Image (cartoon, helix red, strand yellow):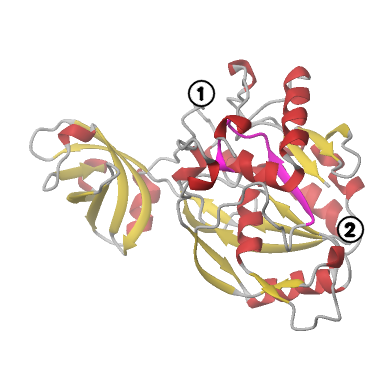
Amino acid sequence: MKISEFDYSLPENLIAQNPIEPRDSSRLMIIDRTTGKFEHRIFRDLPHYLSWGDCLVLNDTRVLPARLRGYKAKTKGKVEVLLLQRVEDRKWEALVKPGRKLPPGVDLIFGDGLLLGHIEERLPGGGRIISFECQGDFKEVLNRIGEVPLPPYIHETLEDKERYQTIYARREESIAAPTAGLHFTPSLLKDLERKGVRFVFVTLQVELDTFRPVRVENVEEHKIHSEYFQLSQASAELINRTINEGKRVIAVGTTSARTLETVAVRSPNPESPGSMGRKWRVGAGKGWTELFIYPGFDFKIVDALITNFHLPKSTTLILVSAFAGRDLIIRAYREAIDRGYRFLSFGDAMLIL
């Protein structure tokens, strides 16, 4: 299939520049895959669409203050570094600016000397391998001098940095937020809990590929960036119990959906098909996933999906199209644009049933 099938015209004024307050006052489009009909609600109305025993799967990753501003040790020229992925304890793959003036061998200074960097290697894609030195714990220093890297399409200053974190974020490893979770508030979680909705946490480190459009003409030829995931035994058992009881597994965000489908395993009990008649469960585990979900993919675990509105030609839009059908999603996006929904990280959400 062609990447042009996942393109649409996004008006710039609909790209949300700031988060709405309170978090759960964002708009929520309900999409019924069976009827093809839409409803337009507010995110705090979510409990009306969930039932006792349903399981919400949330990504508990936390965004690293991964943007570093400093200067070259010799020339004092300004530099900017965006940490992408840890290679070793104090060695990272990173993007650098200005790229042409930062070859291997250059020493860098950040935070008036609190953190020192040395460029060790230039990677084929233009990135760098940088080793760091500091007194004390590296992450503590990073939290003191680093900045949370907002997506490139957000041009406004974010006054409260915690607004680019979910309220349940715990594991500080990502360079971008799992944005579908930004809509949840403590009161909304309590409302869902009172209704008997279960909560399970998974971890998937969100990497830069979230913001990169697919460059190849044929979607199937795209190679997605690998991301680290983790699913505990306790979480796996609760998800499987939900399936065994015929209740729904609802992924909060495309990152949770990818994690669930990555850890899908054949049921050891074929006589118990579970939710939606499927004979699949999940297995605890951790590692790296390069699972690229596009139309034609057979979803084995996810019954419903909460997600934001995504960039044209993005892997996230392609995943959502795989779940709900490309034609239905493009129609939903057109209606969202006509109704003035807010798009992307700080924008509104949809619940696909």
Q: Residue at x 20, y 46 (%)?
A: 113
Which part of the image, by quadrant, shows the N terminus?
top right
- Side (left or right) of 54 relative to 240: right
Q: Which residues are magenta?
A: 303-315
Q: Secondary structure at mark 2?
A: helix
Quick one: 11 or 155, which is closer to the camera?
11
**Amino acid residing under circle 2:** Arg
Name the residue beneath numbered marker 2.
Answer: 194
Q: Could you tell which of marks 1 and 2 lies nearer the N-terminus? A: 1
Quick one: 247 or 130, which is closer to the camera?
247
Q: Residue at x 92, y 46 (%)?
A: 48
Quick one: 320 or 115, which is closer to the camera?
320
Residue 206 painted magenta: no
In the rendering, which numbered label is found on residue 57?
none
Q: Where residue 209 sits in the image (x, y, percent)?
A: 47, 44
Q: Is residue 320 visible?
A: yes
Disc 2 crowd, CA 10 A, few/some/many (<14, 14-19, 20+) = few
Q: Where residue 53 sits in the image (x, y, percent)?
A: 88, 64
Q: Residue at x 62, y 33 (%)?
A: 6
Quick one: 34 or 91, which is closer to the camera?
34
Q: Is residue 22 visible?
A: no
Q: Quadrant of residue 201?
A: bottom right
Q: Where residue 308 sits in the image (x, y, percent)?
A: 68, 38
- Side (left or right) of 16 relative to 243: left
Q: Residue at x 62, y 32 (%)?
A: 5
Gap in Å between the C-alphas at discs 1 and 2? Answer: 37 Å
Q: Secondary structure at mark 1?
A: loop
Disc 1 crowd, CA 10 A, few/some/many (<14, 14-19, 20+) = few
Name the residue beneath numbered marker 1.
Answer: 156
**Amino acid residing under circle 1:** Glu
